Amino acid sequence: MGIKPIKVAQLNSYINRVLNLDPILGNVSVVGEISNLKFHGSGHVYFSLKDDTSTVRCFIAASNVMKMTCPIEEGMEVIATGYIAVYERGGYYSLNVRELETNGIGQLAVQFQKLKDKLSREGLFDETHKKAIPAFASKIAVVTSETGAAIRDIIRTIKNKNTYTDILVYPVLVQGPAAAGEISRAIDDLNANHKDVDVIITGRGGGSMEELWAFNEEIVARSIYNSKIPVISAVGHETDFTIADFVADLRAATPTAAAEAAAFDTFEMLNYLEEVKTNLKNSLLSIAEIKKNRLESLNPSVFESVLRSRITYEQMNADSIIEKMESDIKTKLSALRDKIEHEREVLEAANPKSIFARGYSVIRDNNGKIINTTADLNIGNTISIETFDGNAKAKITEL
């Protein structure tokens, strides 16, 4: 007879104790490639270590994350050292990592870089080849899984922006060996048989490198490059990059961002048109008012009134000018009078008659030469004396 039945929690707890007592599983180092990496808001890190055939769940506590000296990146090949423990609530075991060291680049990361370098050399990423996303797309094709969260986000975003754009959902696998072929054929078919499509969105939600790998396949990259219809790549989260992102005409950080870029906002446009309408109405009213005023000015009675007002104004302006001219002339005449009077006084002061009137006289010899000094006189000389009121002659008797 078997032992008494136990609860699931008791079984998981017992397995956990057994694992903790194992000397090897208590301190084990495992080589593998980081996959399905997730950084939790709590600071903990969750990922899987994988090799060609198997995977194991791994967990790094937030307190240990800060101590890590090597990068924790998707696709890196690492050596993880820690202990095996059972998550009793979920019933699965994981490697609780204490230390992490780089052991090389994972196989997928190597493939990714090799293809990226190859396509880059061929010019598939050149900006000159990229097509502009139309501003007013009337039909948008979405190449993705018809059941994923990405298609729901894209449809909701487009419908929130307008009710005009048609959405063509082209369902494909976005994960697994057949996914790349389906995505490639969908893009080719849209170009060949759906000429009314203005833009293509292709992508999916986030995931590990393996889950996103279909968008790293060369066949998908070449279909995007050869597409005559502009292609927006929207794969994973903002931090995820795929080959499709590099070759697409536009890389969107998320499927929602792709929908935002592809669809125009009719509600915003209606607001803009309403503003244009208001401005146009105001401009027309202003022009009409100007024309009305011009028509009124052509009315004879209005014209007469305006003309009389203009004549009155011009008369007032002429009177003002005349008054100013008269004032300026008077000022100039007064200045001229003052100058003439000054010149007269100067001339009067220099007049010999005026000098004679003050008691001066002029003495000349018989030849009419003015005598300035007694040295020019001799006793017995006859001289003439000119005064204010006449002339006299005298004879020198004494010097």
Image (tube, rainbow, N blue to C red):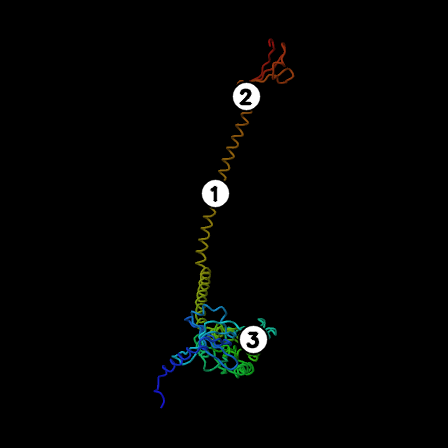
Mark-to-mark CA distance, 2 and 1? 45 Å
User: Percent from the top left, x then y, of residue 83?
Assistant: 44, 75
Q: Quadrant of the C terminus?
A: top right
Q: Which mark is residue 355?
A: 2
State whether residue 163 appears in this view. Answer: no
Q: Earlier in the sequence, mark 3 or mark 2?
A: 3
Instruction: Name the amino acid type tagged 1.
Output: Lys
Q: Residue 195: name its quadrant.
A: bottom right
Q: Earlier in the sequence, mark 2 or mark 1?
A: 1
Residue at numbered disc 1: 324
Q: Which mark is residue 110?
A: 3
**Residue 389 vs residue 366: left or right?**
left
Q: Residue 243: name its quadrant.
A: bottom right
**Residue 284 vs residue 350: left or right?**
left
Q: Quadrant of the N terminus?
A: bottom left
Secondary structure under the numbered disc 3 in the rendered image: helix
Q: Residue furthest left?
A: 4
User: Percent from the top left, x then y, of residue 247?
Assistant: 56, 75
